[in-house]
Amino acid sequence: MKILIYGSYGYTGDLIVRQCKDQGLIPHLAGRNEAALKAQSLKYDLPFTVCEVSVKAFKELVASHDVLVHSAGPFIHTAEVAIEACVEGKTHYLDITGEYKVFELAQKFDRQAKEQQVMVLPGCGFDVVPSDCLAAHLKNRLKDATILRIAFAGLGAGMSRGTAKTMVEGMGTGGRIRKNGELIKVSNTHHITTIDFGPFSSKAVTIPWGDISTAYFSTGIPTIMVYMAANKKIIRSLQLGDLFGFVFRWDWVKNRMKKKVEKRSPGPSDQKRQKASSYFWAEAKNDSNQLVVSRLEVPDGYTLTALCTVAILQKIQKGLNRYGYQTPSTAFGADFILEIPGCTRTDE
């Protein structure tokens, strides 16, 4: 199977390349930075191509491969062109986004992808494999659920530069939830609550996580809210964002913040990731107030992204994928997350 990884030299992209090599897969590396690609090519003894997403050469490169793993975010700027190239080139599309706008965009390619017999599957890592599989599991447990709440917490790993840049890109746009089937704009601190993750409890606040799109597609549950565990400092920052969000919409402010992000380390060390874990909690409720709760414990987000992405590549290699727009659970089932090493699920 011919695998193309675009943005391969980024922090998460490199983890995916390493996992591919560990599993005997030989990807082709690609991106804009020639120096970074050369260094990575020498490190892993892999071929590479330098190109921009927007150029004709990118479409030709995509068409000569069976699957594209797009790992160069923020994806809201590049996903549409990349998906178009994949659909035209009859190449499966994967990415590691958590941006709800990208999921909404990708759904528009469903018919074309089915006609071309390719799969379009954004969100094949921490965003949103565990949460999407958990949502589907709860739907299976409570068929007539009308409200879904999902929360996550990461302990000990920290954040990569790419994740931080994506967060900067979304600043100033407010929060989002899904209510009665529609995406609704809300404040950054629309709802603050306390979540019992199992080993610990934490304050959590609603965020516009990808599941407000993917979980709706996967389950049909009309009202969905996603929460992130947050301390007082984070909540206070979000509250200030509600008051002064317009400032963060100014390009010069975002550019300045991105320059600060560039000075950070690429991401957490291997040792830090190995000691870290992530936790998910989800609750589904129907109109009769019947309630089901499930939890997941998984490796840290970056490790999980590499493991999930390569597991999906292996399924594609075996012909176990579906065509058209898919989420992790619609493509591979609610129990797919349990196939990933280090992932456990409990039910109430």
Image (cartoon, grey):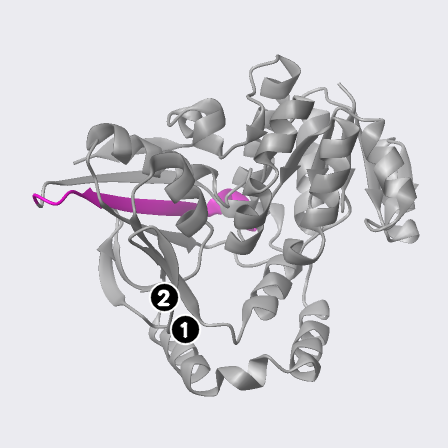
Q: Secondary structure at mark 1?
A: helix
Percent x, y of residue 340: 47, 27
Q: Nearer the viewer, residue 212 or 167?
A: 212
**Residue at the top extreme of this rendering:** 318
Percent x, y of residue 239: 38, 80
Q: Which residues are magenta?
A: 272-288
Amino acid carrying mark 1 in the image: Ile
Q: Nearer the viewer, residue 146 or 241?
A: 146
Res 23 → quadrant: top right
Q: Is residue 206 visible?
A: yes
Left or right, 97 with reference to 11: left
User: Residue at the location (45% across, 80% down)?
Assistant: 241
Assess whether mark 2 and mark 1 are in contact (beta carbons under 8 angstroms): yes
Location of mark 2 (residue):
230
Dot 2 alpha-carbon crowd within 10 angstroms: few under 14, some 14 to 19, many 20 or more: some
User: Residue at the location (70% across, 83% down)?
Assistant: 252
Left or right, 227 with reference to 101: left
Left or right, 314 with reference to 213: right
Quarter of the image containing the C terminus? top left
User: Residue at the location (68% across, 79% down)?
Assistant: 251
Asked if residue 4 is positioned above or below residue 243 in the image, the reply reads: above
Task: Point out which mark residue 206 bears.
Answer: none
**How far apart are the two marked residues, 1 and 2, measured between alpha carbons?**
6 Å
Location of mark 1 (residue):
234
* Membership of 287 in magenta stretch: yes
Dot 1 alpha-carbon crowd within 10 angstroms: few under 14, some 14 to 19, many 20 or more: few
**Residue at the left extreme of this rendering:** 288
Left or right, 309 with reference to 60: left
